[in-house]
Image (tube, rainbow, N blue to C red):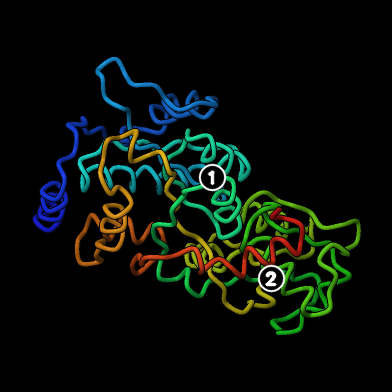
Amino acid sequence: MSTRRAARSGVLRSQSPLPPFSRRSLLAGAGVVLAAALPGCGRSSPVSQSASGSAGPLRIGAIPDQDPEVLQRLYGTVADSMSAALDLDVEYRPVTDYGAAVSLFRTGDLDLVWFGGLTGVQARLQTPGAEPVAQRDIDERFTSVFVVNAATGLTPSDDLAPLAPLRFTYGSETSTSGRLMPAYFLREAGVDPQGFPGGPGFSGSHDATLQLVASGSYQAGVLNKQVWTSRSEEGSVDPSVVLHTETPPYHDYHWLLGPRAAERLGVDDLGGRLIDYFTGLSAGDPADAEVLELFGAGSFIPTEVANYDQIEEIGRDLGLVS
């Protein structure tokens, strides 16, 4: 642990003593993590106390918006970092789909979840007392990109109308950047977001959208710009996939804390401590820099419910929020 990290952890402990959780690294291998995590995802009631008498770990999760191995590396790293900074046992539990993340958060099987804007709204409305904790700096002005297969002959443009006659796929049905906001911008441009030939597809993730457009299974699709930029820099985007349009900005991803986590763990002001942890991550510290890089962020910043009012309104209008 760096000197700066140790100092921060010490300040937090001095404000309100934490219970003596044992620290457990989740980087010992994906097999160990999955073995521990998957049974937990099947529970529909809060985890009982362990044989040692502790309340168990802080259970974190995330919507599965990218390839599983990418998610495992990302959230295994952040769990280890959070555990070291807060002296908490932290466990990442993967989920099968967006709906499962919302459901497991509602039942209390997940304490802290990285949601997209729409799933965060859905989870918060279904879980009274849920608290938005932090978002990345890039989530204040997040965007999506519409991509096309080069065989369409389309080139970069601000005009979405040429997409209307193409076979088109969104990401997950409840993805903010892969479905909700793109559908909104299509409608604003006069394109029926459900009117594509044969109806739109739903790939399930941003990476899958790229693969489907590259293969020609769909002629066009939409994903978030962060994934597009990351995959482009890696050189993993097939040359047959070209960017067509970038959307206007909107608020998106954020961490949401469940209302029962602090009491279960016996940790006073857990929300405040998590805000301090995320906003205290610094690119100047090697361990912090790894977390920020994996998230594609320069920093984390506090967030609030009002930032997602537009998403809630659009979600209700499109029938995705009730």
Instruction: Please state which of residues 313 and 220 is positioned toward the viewer in this rendering.
Output: 313
Q: Quadrant of residue 111?
A: top left
80 over 45 or under it: above or below: below
* Label 2 crowd (10 A; few <14 / some 14-19 / many >=20): many
Residue 183 drawn at (x, y percent): 74, 67
Q: In the shown orientation, is residue 210 left or right of residue 39?
A: right
Task: Classify mark 1: helix, strand or loop.
Answer: loop
Q: Position of residue 22 (x, y in %)?
A: 21, 30
Could you tell me which residue is drawn at 53 percent across and 34 percent down?
Answer: 107
Identify the residue at image location x=73%, y=81%. 155
Left/right placement of residue 152 relative to residue 94 reads right
Q: Count residues near mark 1 (Cα–Cα under 10 Å), then give few for <14, some for 14-19, many for 20+.
A: some
Q: Where is residue 283? Give x, y as percent.
A: 25, 66
Name the residue beneath numbered marker 1. 127
Question: Along the horizontal axis of the image, is 29 left or right of 37?
Answer: left
> Which quarter of the figure has residue 221?
bottom right
At x 59% / y 46%, what residue is drawn?
Answer: 126
In front of the other: 19 or 147: 19
User: Residue 125's spot in the image, x, y percent?
Assistant: 58, 51
How far, Cα to Cα, is label 2 from label 1?
Answer: 33 Å
Is 149 left or right of 284, judged from the image as shown? right
- Amino acid at circle 1: Thr
Q: In the rendered structure, which amino acid carries the disc numbered 2?
A: Phe
Q: Secondary structure at mark 2?
A: strand
Q: Is residue 288 above or below residue 62?
A: below
Name the outermost residue toward the front: 128
Say which residue label 2 marks.
Answer: 146
Residue 276 in sight from this viewpoint: yes
| Of the pair 6 and 200, the residue shown nearer to us | 6
